[in-house]
Amino acid sequence: QVQLVESGGGLVQPGGSLRLSCAASGFTLDIYAIGWFRQAPGKEREGVSCISRSDGSTYYRDSVKGRFTISKDNANNTVYLQMNSLKPEDTAIYYCAASPSSALTTTGRWYPYWGPGTQVTVSS
């Protein structure tokens, strides 16, 4: 049974940092790519970053490049999203999702498995 659980969200001031974790079970990270998505109130869900299942290739949306870093620990079956220099516009519920696709994509329809999400609030 594939399961994903996010943790690490919270309230942080602008310019601060958070590290989100996505703990996976029921599969291993060498057969599923992992993506991070977010949805702010009143806005559509958007892809933030993803990491491939094979060579660890990564992708970031333009607005987070240079601030966010995705990584994975295959031994612990966990994917991380390090978020630095956070801005109020980063406020959203963050979800991790798993995809069997070999493509590096943050198109949501390629991700059949989703975690429940974790709230990130950036505010002074």
Image (cartoon, grey):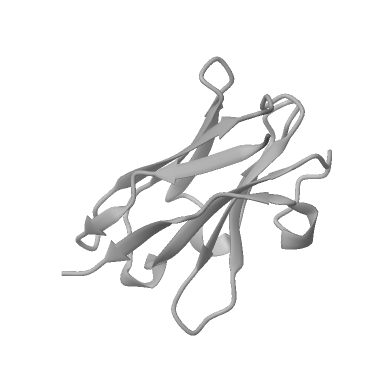
Q: Which image quadrant for residue 8? A: top left
Q: Residue furthest front?
A: 1
Q: Quadrant of the N terminus?
A: top right
> Where is residue 106 drawn, in percent x and y?
70, 56
Q: Residue at x 83, y 42 (%)?
A: 101
Q: Residue at x 69, y 35 (%)?
A: 57
Give the answer, above or below, for where 27 lies relative to 95.
Answer: above
> Where is residue 32 drawn, in percent x and y?
73, 34
Q: Which image quadrant for residue 19? A: top left
Horizontally, residue 31 falls left or right of residue 66, namely right
Q: Residue at x 50, y 54 (%)?
A: 116
Q: Nearer the viewer, residue 104 or 21?
A: 21
Horizontally, residue 101 falls left or right of residue 116, namely right
| Total marks placed | 0
Q: Quadrant of the C terminus?
A: bottom left
Give the answer, above or below, for where 50 lies relative to 87.
Answer: above
Q: Residue furthest right?
A: 102
Give the answer, above or below, for where 117 lies relative to 5.
Answer: below
> Where is residue 119 drawn, in percent x and y?
37, 60
Q: Nearer the viewer, residue 42 or 50?
A: 42
Q: Residue furthest left?
A: 124
Q: Nearer the viewer, residue 97 or 46?
A: 97
Q: Residue furthest bottom?
A: 42
> Where is residue 94 drawn, in percent x and y?
47, 57
